[in-house]
Amino acid sequence: MSKLYMNRLYMNNLCINSRFIHNLCMSIRLWCRLYMVFLMLGFTVMFTSLPALAHQPVMDMAPRWEGGWGFQLRQQNISADTLLDGTTKIANQAKLSINIDKLWLEGIYTFKREVRLSVKLPYIKQSRTVIRANAPVYESGSGIGDLIIGLPLKRYRNEIDSTGNIAITPSIRLPTGSTDASFPLGDGSIDLGLSLSASFEQAKWYQYYDLFYWINNQGSKQIDKGDELGLDINIGWHPYHDNLSNTGVFLMLDISARLEQKGQDSAGITGGKRVSAGPVFVWYRAGAMLRVEYKLPLYEDVEAIQVSYGDEFTLGIGLVF
């Protein structure tokens, strides 16, 4: 068999495999869209007359009883001034940077242990320095961001010395954030998300895993971010608990991984891969909870040239009833 024939055969197989993978990815994306649209339409009919109280608040841990509800406030800060070309740090002579402060108001209502409704709404104050017409330009924006509504559906398993649950959570992100500011607060699109999560808890140990996918549709002002696949992992130690006052402490490691398809926002190209990690401290007493966490990027590979995602600090306070 000639080398020319073998090369042609290899190229044909490569093209066929590439088309197959592309078609498979498009089919998965289409079925995810249809599935989540169907679910969200059903949920809208079911819950139109019910109160939307709602993150998989509170702190992804409570409430766990029928008729329980709660809310939390989370102050989140993300800042960076490191410029990346793929995985390589490059000189940032234009002093490009980004700083985002978000105050999240989040609530949850438990219709029964297996069915909940969650709502998350951020107030955003943000600024960045970007390149416009070959010159650095300062841009900013402040106000209400995009509203996220989710419906966590859980299944519990309780043992003598442990408890655990698995959950599927369809979500929808509504374009309540303005796109008028030089640094837009939203993207002007309706986006759909689906999360698969599991948590396990023993007297001294806690584990939480969340795999999710967001379908980011094209918005306004030429904003068209790529879809996002994410994984969050919390591994924790429960060193202290007092039964009498229901007071205790968790110490955890938070690991986050993100894969975002190439897209664009009002400043340019978006997308890439990153892994972040950091410590988490949780304190609780009766129906009150405090969570403090800090994460820094361990690995980043951005599309084109972008400012790093940066360090992230979050402080949250929650109450359950």
Image (cartoon, rainbow, N blue to C red):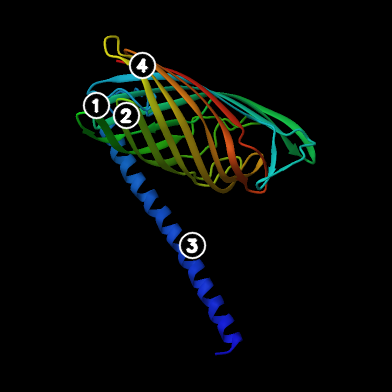
Q: Are marks 2 and 1 in contact (CB under 8 Å)?
A: yes
**Residue identifier under label 1:** 111
**Residue identifier under label 2:** 117
Q: How many callouts does the rendering have?
A: 4
Q: Nearer the viewer, mark 4 or mark 2?
A: 4
Q: CA distance from mark 2 to mark 3?
A: 35 Å
| Residue 22 badge | 3
In the rendered view, would you say 271 is above or below 173? below
310 to the left or right of 133: left
Front-most of 99 and 130?
99
Whichever of callouts 2 and 1 sits on the residue coming sooner in the sequence is: 1
Residue 6 percent coordinates (x, y) = 56, 83
Whichever of callouts 4 and 2 sits on the residue coming sooner in the sequence is: 2
Q: Residue at x 37, y 28 (%)?
A: 60
Q: CA distance from mark 1 to mark 3?
A: 41 Å
Type of the residue with mark 2: Leu
Q: Residue at x 48, y 69 (%)?
A: 17
Q: Nearer the viewer, mark 4 or mark 1?
A: 4
Q: Residue at x 54, y 90 (%)?
A: 1
